[in-house]
Image (cartoon, rainbow, N blue to C red):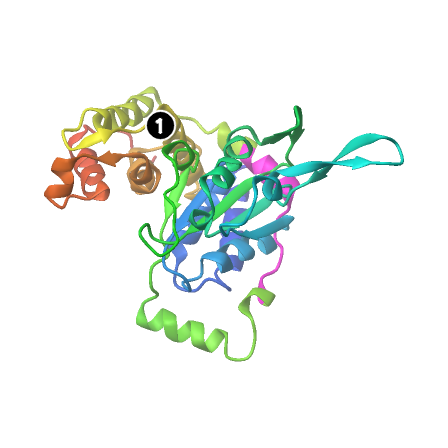
Amino acid sequence: MNNTYYTNQINSVIAEVKKAVIGKDAIIIKALLAMLCKGHILIEDIPGVGKTTLALAFSKALSLEHNRMQFTPDVLPSDVTGFSVYNKSNGKFEFRPGVAFCNLFLADEINRTSSKTQSALLELMEEKSITVDGNTYKLPEPYTVIATQNPIGSAGTHNLPDSQLDRFMIKLSMGYPDFEGEVSILKAKHSENPLENVKPVADASFIKELQEYISNIYIDDRIYEYIVSISAATRNHPMLKLGVSPRGTLALMQLSKGIAVAMGRDYVIPEDISYICNDVFEHRIMLNSKAKLSDTSPSDIITEILRTVPVPGISEK
């Protein structure tokens, strides 16, 4: 298969999801590319802007088995991972899979549950497996977690630990729709649920095939150095007390390859990196007191870094 075929397939999935998620094209594209680059997605926003609809639309368009869990303070780690049950008939313990065993796991309002339950997601997000009572169980492939959270400081929320934030390839925000978009939402939901119009245009085997294709996209040595230079700049910035981890650097590289394919190329250019850098890095850096006092945001710092790091002279052919 050539690059044009895969680009067309990506566009087909985007077109289906847009039937249910109106006026958020950039969010749809970035979320899909994160899934195709084997990453997990964190969506932080106020309730009612379409976070859950986005995840459900992807599960339909991609023909993925999905499970959804509403995270509340009483959710236990075993509800997510599964547990062992004693079988009297054979005298053995048998494993009962938890809700995370699927292709697309929607963790709704993840920051409303306890830290202990949040930590149950660490292994499955990094290793794509779950260990219960000393036994390790592989999760289905492809596997993606789409987690939603309410803004930090909302009633009943708990901050996600840095180790878990770092496992999300990308962090997005839906935001309010614009005037025309909200009118379109009202019209679309006047007599039916737009999700019912989303048709499957891909399946798990195709996603794995596309993931493999994306992983082999060409990156010039100058692009590798550009990515590392941006990451290094966050670690030495005077307004940051925590810079981007090597996991974040890898995430930026992987997503840049996905963007290249979506744009119809089989090689990465600097614009691919600058397009997605904020979404990959913003949740991975930590401001110091100087930045907070000057009302500087993580996005401001990343934008400044992108402006100051020399851009390699590589462009579209």
Quadrant location of the C terminus? top left
- Amino acid type, mark 1: Thr
Q: Is residue 205 magenta?
A: yes
Residue at 63%, 36% (x, y): give it.
Answer: 141
Q: Residues within 10 Å of mark 1 (few under 14, many from 20)?
A: many
Q: Is residue 270 left or right of residue 168?
A: left
Q: Is residue 154 magenta?
A: no
Towards the viewer: 33 or 171? 171
Towards the viewer: 281 or 121? 121
Residue at 34%, 59% (x, y): give it.
Answer: 175
Q: How many marks?
A: 1
Quadrant location of the N terminus? top right
- The secondary structure type at the circle numbered 1 is helix
- Residue 265, image quadrant: top left
Q: Position of residue 24 (x, y in %)?
A: 39, 59
- Residue 238, image quadrant: top left
Q: Which residue is mark 1?
A: 249
Q: Position of residue 59 (x, y in %)?
A: 58, 52
Towards the viewer: 135 or 21? 135
> Where 155 falls versus 163 (above or below)?
below
Towards the viewer: 107 or 55? 107
Main secondary-structure element of the magenta-colored stretch: helix
Residue at 49%, 74% (x, y): give it.
Answer: 188
Q: Is residue 15 left or right of residue 157?
A: right
- Whether residue 36 is visible, yes or no, is yes
Residue at 34%, 26% (x, y): give it.
Answer: 245
Q: Which residues are magenta?
A: 197-211
Q: Is residue 200 left or right of residue 20?
A: right
Q: Position of residue 117 (x, y in %)?
A: 51, 40
> Where 5 falls versus 28 (above or below)?
above
Q: Position of residue 154 (x, y in %)?
A: 34, 55
